[in-house]
Amino acid sequence: MRRNVATLVDTPSGKRRGRPSKSLTLEQAEAVLRAAKGSNLEAYVVLSLMTGARTEEIRALRWADVDLDGEPDSNPPVLPHVDVWRSVRAHGDTKTEKSRRTLAVPQIAVDALRAHQRVRLETTRKSGRCSSRDDYVLTTRTGSQMDSANVRRDFRAVLAKVDGLSPKDWTLREQRHSFVSLLSDSGVAIEEIARLAGHSSSRTTEVVYRKQLRPVLQTAAIVMDGIFSAGRLKQAIGPVVSESDCV
């Protein structure tokens, strides 16, 4: 054909707007972690909330990608970490090149992964199979790889145990939004959050997670207040003149 006839058609606009994402508060996040304790999805919940990894990245993790010991005696020490280098996308790669990253994991995640590993090893032994470092970290109770439907179902079961959180009102991606929000509330710079989240630029973090980010324009004022105390500043520039002192 000599021309694209599709250009002659005016495409209709969508009738349904997507629901804006939200994030868990610190208290809600702690409640979700408690509810997930001992469940088949505990490792997933902890990893997604503590590292901000995407659901398709966590489901692609194999035990070969997990180092729960690190190298504490090296200089500098290497913390326990996970290698987020692939996903369950059709091509097997991460969403973007910058999404390939190695993420240190806090002790709570190390503990959850060790407990999960013990359960998986016992399940594998009972099934008569040999465990392998190529086994997926996140599996069903029968040992098969978890798909998105498995994770959604188990995640809703966890949320159902938390007072005030309705399973139908929360999605898996909002664990990632909560990760961004909690870091931002703790004063972590947006550029560092973008690196941890695997975004191609901090602009992506700002656009997608705008509601989860605290205003950054107040940062300079807060820091300067700490650098220059009111007393020292008063001595340096003299007393403040009020309108009543003017003639």
Image: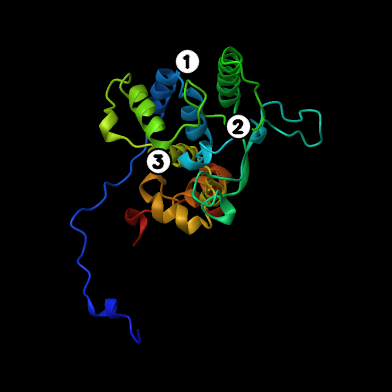
Identity, as a three-letter code, of the amino acid under mark 3: Arg
User: Residue at coordinates 43% horizontally, 54% vertically from top-left?
Assistant: 206
Q: Amino acid at mark 2?
A: Val
Horizontal side of 240 relative to 116 (left or right) equals: left
Residue behind mark 3:
173
Q: Residues within 10 Å of mark 1 (few under 14, many from 20)?
A: some
Q: Is residue 136 above or below residue 90?
A: above
Relative image position of residue 117 (x, y in whole percent): 60, 20
- Report helix, strand or loop for mark 2: loop
| Residue 148 in view of the camera | yes
The tag earlier along the polypeptide, 3 or 2, is 2
Where the C terminus falls, by quadrant?
bottom left
**SS class of the residue under badge 3?**
helix
Cα gap from disc 3 to disc 2, whole angstroms: 19 Å
**Above or below for 8 versus 22:** below
Q: Amino acid at mark 1?
A: Gly
Give how far across and how far down residue 199 sits, in percent.
52, 52
Of the numbered discs 1 and 2, the one sitting upstream in the chain is 1
Identify the residue under disc 1. Answer: 38
Residue 109, given in percent of the width and then of the height, sits at 56, 26
Measure how far apart labels 1 and 2 are at the Cα level: 19 Å
Q: Which mark is residue 105?
A: 2
The picture quadrant where one finds residue 161 is top left
The quadrant of the picture occupied by the N terminus is bottom left
Q: Secondary structure at mark 1?
A: loop
Where is residue 168, by image quadrant?
top left
Mark closer to the chain start, 1 or 3: 1
